[in-house]
Image (cartoon, rainbow, N blue to C red):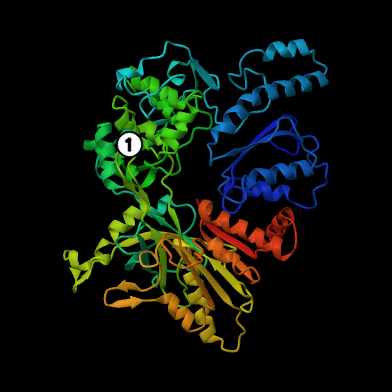
C-alpha cells in the first residue's frame, strides 16, 4: 500500500522505545512524515485509526504513537476511529481489547460512508457487512488490516464459551474460597467466557542427528558487533546482611575495538538458567533429545498471515541451544499463549482454568496471578500438570531471549582497556503462584559465573598460579546519545543516583578527574552527587569497599582531589537520635539545595525515585521562579527538551 494515495482506512499500531522514540521498524516512516516541506494537506485524503502501546512508568508515555498521531493530523489526515493509548503498567489489554472490538464497528461505518459517496445503496452495503468480521476478503474490503495479529481467517476475534462451567473444585479443596492461579471463584467460575481466537500454528519442527556445531552467539545479535571479553575483577559492594547484593564487575576490552563514553550502556548476552532448561526438557519429555539438532521451518498451508521463520531461531541448532540462548523461557505468558495451551491440556478442570485466565472475564485473575506474580511457562506446567505443549508451540509463543542492558560505570580515559558495571542480583521471592524463589536471568548467571573471583579461597579447581580461571562474556554496545557529560566543562552539574543508580556517575567522575589532570588551564564547574541507600554500613556503594587486602573509597578520593565538589547522602532505614530527623530520600535532600543551578542527571528506579525527584524539581522551580505548578512543569519540559534534565531510568 502507499499512504500517499491510500483511500481506504489505515490502522496503525505503534509502540514506544528508548526515551520516547518510535520503534526501529517505524523510524524511517516517522522521519519521512516529519519532513518540514510537506504541505498541510499532504494526507488530506487519509483516514486512520491509531493504537499506541506504552508504559506510564516512563516519562514519554506512548510518545511513539502520539508523535505519529499529531503529525498525521498536522498533515490533514482524519481519524475514522478514536486513538487508543494502552498502558503496560496496568495491563495493555485494558485498552487493547475494547479498542479492537470497537474497531470493527468503526470500519463498518467508514465503509458504509465510502460506498454511499460512490453512489451505492446503503442497503446493499449493510447486507454485505452484516456478517461477523471473519476475514478481509469476506468483508469485500480492498485494504488489509495489517498489524492487528488477527491471524486466523476461520475464527472471530473472540470465541464465546457457553458450555457448562467445569467444577474447578475437582482440583482444589472445596474449603478454598479464595481465587488462586489454579482455582477460580464466582462470578468467573460460573461465567460463560469470551476467550481469544486460537492462534494458528505456523512452525514445524524436525529432529535431526547430534552431529555438528551450534551457531556462534554473535549470529543471534542484529544490533551490532559482538565482543567476547574476559571478566577480570568482581567486587561485592554491599555487606552480607544488606537487603540487596550489589556487585561490580570489570571487563577487559583492551584487545577489542569496543568504544564507549561515560553514560553509555552496553548489553550482555546471557543464557537461561541451565537447571530450568533441564527441568523444561524433562516436563516436555524431550530430555533424550537435548543434543539433537533441530530444523525449524514454516508449516506448509498455515493459516497465519505473513508466517515467517523466527529471526531469533537459528536455521539449525540443538534443542538445548534453542532453549538456553534463544527463547525467553521466563517470559510472562501472553493470553494468546494461554489460549494455545488450553488445547494441550487434558484435565477438564485445568483446561477450564486456563480458559478463564485468558478470557475477558478472567482479566483481573490474569493480572493478579500471572502478570503481577511473574509467572512463567515452567510455573504453569507445574500448576497444570496435564498440559503438555509441543516444541513448535514454544517456539511460536515464547519471545526472543533479550540481551540485558547495563550502564557503564567507568571511563576509558581513566581506565584504558577496562569497562566496569554495577548491578544488584535480582531476587524473585516465592509466592503462592510461584512456589520457588528465583534470581534474575542475567544477574543470577553473572553472580554464579564470578563466584570464583568473589571467593577465590573457596574455589581451588581450574586455577593457574593460584588465581581463578578467567570467565568470558559476550557484549555489544548500546550508545546513549544524550546521557553524557556537558560539552562545556565549566558548566556545573548535579547527579542523582541512589543505589546502583550511582553507577554511571562513577564513570562521570573518573572522566572528570582525568580531564582535570590533563587540562590544568581549563575551568571546571562544580559537581554535586546526591546518593541514597538503606543503611550507611551495609549498602553505601563505593564507600570503603573491601577488595582482598585493599579498601577502596572512591567517593572520598573524588572529594579530596576536588573532582567532586559536594557529596550529599541519605539513609532511608537508619534510625536517628537527632532533634530534627535527617532526610530519608534523595528527593528530600534535593529540596534543601533549591538555589543551586546546573545540568541535572538522574539514574535509577523510575517509579520509586525518578518521579519523586521530578516532583521535587517542579516544586523548586515553582518556588524559586514564583510560578504555579503547571508553569513549573512546562519549564521542566523545556529543560528536558534542551537536554539539561536527563534521565537514565528503569522500572
Q: Secondary structure at mark 1?
A: helix
Task: Report the front residue among 70 and 543.
Answer: 543
Task: Report the front residue among 50 and 553.
Answer: 553
Residue depicted at x 78% and y 23%: 114
Residue depicted at x 76% and y 10%: 123
Q: Determine which quarter of the picture holds residue 109.
A: top right
Q: Determine which quarter of the picture holds residue 111.
A: top right
Q: Is residue 354 visible?
A: yes
Mark 1 = which residue?
Answer: 378
Q: Quadrant of the N terminus?
A: top right
Examine the rendered structure and indicate whether residue 337 appears above or below residue 162: below
- Callout 1: 10 Å neighbours few (<14), some, many (20+)? some
618 sits left or right of 532 in the view: right
Examine the rendered structure and indicate whether residue 354 appears above or below residue 235: above
105 sits left or right of 543 in the view: right
Image position, residue 640 (x, y; %): 66, 60
Examine the rendered structure and indicate whether residue 306 appears above or below residue 534: above
Image position, residue 287 (x, y; %): 23, 37
Image position, residue 43 (x, y; %): 78, 39
- In the rendered image, the residue lying farthest to the left is 461
Task: Report the front residue among 39 and 355.
Answer: 355
Image position, residue 271 (x, y; %): 34, 50
Amino acid at each position: 500500500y502507499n499512504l500517499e494515495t491510500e483511500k481506504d482506512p489505515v490502522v496503525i499500531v505503534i509502540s514506544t522505545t528508548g526515551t520516547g522514540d518510535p520503534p526501529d521498524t517505524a523510524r524511517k516512516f516517522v522521519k519521512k512524515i516529519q519532513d518540514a516541506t510537506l504541505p498541510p494537506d499532504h494526507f488530506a485524503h487519509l483516514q486512520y485509526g491509531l493504537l499506541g502501546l506504552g508504559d506510564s512508568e516512563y516519562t514519554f508515555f506512548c510518545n511513539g504513537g502520539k508523535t505519529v498521531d499529531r503529525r498525521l493530523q498536522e498533515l490533514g489526515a482524519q481519524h475514522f476511529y478514536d486513538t487508543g493509548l494502552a498502558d503496560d503498567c496496568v495491563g495493555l489489554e485494558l485498552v487493547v481489547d475494547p479498542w479492537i472490538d470497537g474497531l470493527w464497528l468503526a470500519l463498518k461505518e467508514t465503509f458504509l460512508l465510502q460506498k454511499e459517496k460512490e453512489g451505492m445503496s446503503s442497503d446493499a452495503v449493510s447486507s454485505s457487512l452484516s456478517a461477523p468480521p471473519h476475514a478481509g476478503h469476506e468483508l469485500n474490503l480492498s485494504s488489509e488490516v495489517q498489524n492487528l495479529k488477527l491471524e486466523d481467517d476461520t475464527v472471530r476475534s473472540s470465541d464465546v464459551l457457553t458450555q457448562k462451567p467445569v467444577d474447578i473444585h475437582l482440583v482444589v479443596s472445596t474449603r478454598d474460597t479464595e481465587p488462586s492461579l489454579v482455582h477460580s471463584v464466582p462470578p468467573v467460575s460460573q461465567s460463560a467466557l469470551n476467550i481469544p481466537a486460537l492462534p494458528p500454528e505456523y512452525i514445524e519442527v524436525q529432529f535431526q542427528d547430534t552431529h555438528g556445531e551450534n551457531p556462534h552467539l554473535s549470529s543471534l545479535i542484529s544490533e551490532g558487533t559482538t565482543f567476547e571479553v574476559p571478566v577480570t575483577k568482581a567486587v561485592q559492594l554491599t555487606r552480607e546482611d544488606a537487603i540487596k547484593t550489589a556487585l561490580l564487575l570489570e571487563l577487559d576490552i583492551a584487545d577489542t575495538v569496543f568504544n564507549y563514553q561515560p553514560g553509555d550502556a552496553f548489553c550482555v548476552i546471557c543464557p537461561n538458567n541451565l537447571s530450568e532448561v533441564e527441568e523444561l526438557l524433562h516436563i516436555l519429555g524431550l530430555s533424550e533429545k537435548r543434543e539433537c539438532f533441530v530444523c525449524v521451518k514454516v508449516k506448509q498451508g498455515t493459516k497465519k498471515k505473513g508466517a515467517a521463520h523466527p529471526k531469533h531461531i537459528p536455521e539449525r541448532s540443538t534443542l538445548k541451544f534453542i532453549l538456553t540462548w534463544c527463547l525467553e523461557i521466563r517470559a510472562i505468558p501472553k493470553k494468546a499463549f494461554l489460549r494455545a495451551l488450553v488445547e494441550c491440556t487434558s484435565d477438564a478442570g485445568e483446561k477450564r482454568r486456563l480458559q478463564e485466565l485468558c478470557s475477558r472475564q478472567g482479566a483481573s485473575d490474569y493480572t493478579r496471578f500471572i502478570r503481577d506474580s511473574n509467572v512463567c511457562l515452567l510455573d504453569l506446567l507445574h500448576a497444570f500438570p496435564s498440559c503438555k505443549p509441543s516444541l513448535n508451540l514454544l517456539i511460536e509463543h515464547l519471545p526472543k531471549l533479550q540481551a540485558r542492558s547495563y550502564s557503564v560505570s567507568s571511563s576509558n580515559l581513566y581506565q584504558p582497556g577496562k569497562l566496569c558495571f554495577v548491578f544488584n542480583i535480582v531476587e524473585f521471592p516465592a509466592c503462592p503462584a510461584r512456589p520457588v524463589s528465583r534470581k534474575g536471568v542475567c544477574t543470577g548467571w553473572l553472580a554464579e559465573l564470578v563466584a570464583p573471583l568473589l571467593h577465590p579461597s573457596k574455589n581451588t579447581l581450574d586455577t593457574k598460579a593460584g588465581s581463578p580461571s578467567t570467565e568470558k562474556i559476550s557484549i555489544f554496545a548500546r550508545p546513549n546519545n544524550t546521557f553524557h557529560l556537558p560539552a562545556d566543562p565549566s558548566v556545573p552539574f548535579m547527579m542523582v543516583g541512589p543505589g546502583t543508580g550511582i553507577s554511571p556517575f562513577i564513570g562521570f567522575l573518573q572522566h572528570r578527574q582525568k580531564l582535570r589532570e590533563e587540562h590544568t588551564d581549563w575551568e571546571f564547574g562544580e559537581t554535586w552527587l546526591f546518593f541514597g541507600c538503606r543503611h550507611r554500613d551495609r549498602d553505601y556503594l563505593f564507600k570503603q569497599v573491601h577488595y582482598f587486602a585493599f579498601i577502596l573509597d572512591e567517593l572520598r578520593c573524588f572529594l579530596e582531589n576536588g573532582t567532586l565538589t559536594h557529596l550529599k547522602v541519605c539513609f532511608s532505614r537508619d534510625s536517628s537520635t537527632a532533634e530534627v530527623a535527617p532526610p530519608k530520600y534523595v528527593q528530600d535532600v534535593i529540596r534543601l539545595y533549591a538555589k543551586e543551578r546546573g545540568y541535572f542527571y538522574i539514574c535509577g528506579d523510575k517509579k520509586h525515585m525518578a518521579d519523586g525527584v521530578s516532583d521535587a524539581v517542579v516544586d523548586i522551580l515553582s518556588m524559586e521562579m514564583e510560578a504555579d505548578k503547571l508553569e513549573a512543569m512546562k519549564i521542566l519540559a523545556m529543560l528536558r527538551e534542551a537536554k539539561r534534565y536527563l534521565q537514565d531510568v528503569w522500572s
